[in-house]
Amino acid sequence: MDAREKFVRALRFERPSEIPFPNMFYKFHPETLRRWQREGLPKDVHLIEYLGLERCELIPVNVGPLPNYEAVGLEEIEEWRLGVDRSFLTTLESKIRSVEEEFPIRNAVDFESFKKILNPYSPARYPRFWDDYVRRVKERNYPLGVSLGSPLSWLVEWIGLKGIASSLKTDPSWIISVAQDLTNFVISTVKRALHDLPLDFAIFLEPRAYRLTCIAETNWITEICKKIYAPVVSWVKNMGIDLVGVESQGHVYELTETWARVGINFISIEVSNGGDIEWIRKTLDSRVAVIGNIDHRVLAWSKRDIMDEVSRKMKFFEQGGYIPAPDRVILADVSWENFKYFIKILKDYKRISTI
């Protein structure tokens, strides 16, 4: 099987002949790479190829503010005061006691103005040579997907937790209307791509969605999720893409049931924040496949710990609906020796299961 077939079969609960290694779900902090180079990683290699990972990409469509908004006209201030007292002791103190965070959207008027950079028909959303790109990737042997943006994270980033909490108390209909506008924006932006290309998957990228669970009641989060996700997921599936997922960070396990209800059928979330695959299987049965879920913290521990973590997770690969990979960005506390060992035992999992 090629990388494309392995990836698709695994997420459809059809066990592939080999483990997929989609490079899109292997992320490395820059400091991690510097450490690994000090520990023996050659500096003149492509890391993905060197580790034996497989190509997995998103199409080059810009789903987000265009141009990206910037903070301008801010006054520069000195934040710290460094001094020496009469006893020749050095002191460092903050000159700023509190800072009020500003967000670009505070009300409906702000949002109407902000929507100028949410024009789904901006020419720069697609690359100049899009038609050439389409011809080139139609005969691919690797999985290719489309980003559906970050609607929940956008609410957090553009309105702020305080603004969302206030609006949910005073004017919840406004938040719902914003959510619906974001839904229309995402669909309109990617419509051309889904017409032009047969894609393998679509995915929401939600790095800040976990922050909503801190300030909003579960019923409101559920309602917002339904308004944002359900129309997009339904439309994408009607366009022929049956694999629709969410990649998220932080404490989001309360959202998983809602995601499953609106048609999300694969997720990538962190183990350390309640998202262990054993819990996912007990809660969601076989409705949702999982990518990742190898606890990134364990990769910094002993080889025995790494072996135990991989062995525990591989039974789910045997059952189908699971692609093993680290559950978040690999930080610099993971040694090069440990990560090589992790990749090796994944590739040798048949032998490991008999030990």
Image (spheres, helix red, strand yellow):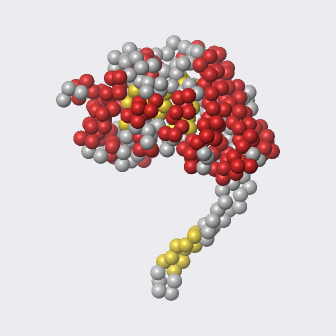
Q: Is residue 40 above or below residue 7?
A: below
Q: Is residue 5 left or right of residue 230?
A: left
Furthest residue to the front? 219
Residue occupying the point 55% across, 31% down: 259
Residue occupying the point 81% across, 45% down: 109
Residue occupying the point 62% across, 68% down: 96
Q: Is residue 66 left or right of residue 31?
A: right
Quarter of the image with the C terminus in it: top left
Q: Position of residue 95 (x, y in %)?
A: 61, 71
Q: Is residue 122 above or below residue 131?
A: below
Furthest residue to the bottom? 86
Q: Is residue 264 left or right of residue 73?
A: left
Q: Position of residue 303 (x, y in %)?
A: 25, 41
Residue occupying the point 38% across, 22% down: 320
Furthest residue to the right? 109
Q: Which picture quadrant has residue 79?
A: bottom right
Quarter of the image with the N terminus in it: top left
Q: Which picture quadrant has residue 182?
A: top right
**Nearer the observer, 343 or 105:** 105
